[in-house]
Amino acid sequence: MSFINQILPKITRSTVATENDAAGATGFTLKPVYQLSQTPEAWTLVAQLPGVTKEGLEVTAEDGLVTIKGRRAWQQPEGWTSLYRESYDSPYALTLQHDNTVDAGQIQAELKDGLLRVSLPKAAALKPRKITVN
């Protein structure tokens, strides 16, 4: 089986903050919106993580799982009074399961403009290869 057939979000609890939660997000985790594509060499995961910085982001790969954890921190500028707010301090979490077909030692991640791009190279056994005929 390939990674694409084994995508199973594991940490996907998502709740909308309420008006009473004005002090920040406590008790809820957001699942980021994401897209997964593939080439013959790798899968590419692109996740939307608005407001998350590199310092607030963790990407791990172990035991057939790729996990993204991040935290968006919103700070109100000094002297401002919020009249209405939909932006909260909140954690993001997403775990995708694969069948160990990813070369974990070659995974690369880049965060730019609120988009996290994770390159998940396929294990050598899955990559197409040309066979010489004698």
Image: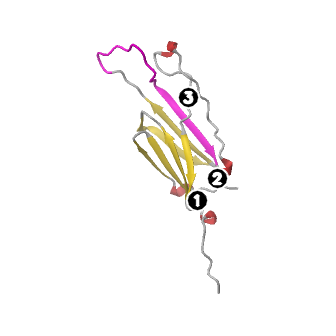
Compared across the picture, whether 54 is left or right of 18 comes to left
Q: Secondary structure at mark 2?
A: helix
Q: Label 3: which residue?
A: 29
10 Å crowding of disc 1: few (<14), some (14-19), many (20+): many
Q: Which residue is depicted at the point 52% across and 33% down?
A: 92
The residue furthest bottom is: 134
Amino acid residing under circle 1: Lys
Position of residue 85 measured from the top left corner of the image (x, y, whole percent): 43, 18
Magenta-colored stretch includes residue 9: no
The residue furthest left is: 79
Q: Label 2: which residue?
A: 3
Label located before the other in sequence (3 or 2): 2
**Residues marked 1 and 2 touching at CB (< 8 Å):** yes
Amino acid residing under circle 3: Thr
Q: Which residue is depicted at the point 46% across and 15% down?
A: 22
Q: Which portion, as a residue range, is magenta?
A: 77-97
**Residues marked 3 and 1 touching at CB (< 8 Å):** no
Q: Tell me, what colour scheme is on the image? A: secondary structure
Q: Which residue is depicted at the point 64% across and 83% down?
A: 133
Q: Quadrant of the N terminus?
A: bottom right
User: Spatial distance from mark 1 to mark 2, Cα to Cα?
Assistant: 9 Å
Q: Quadrant of residue 114?
A: top left
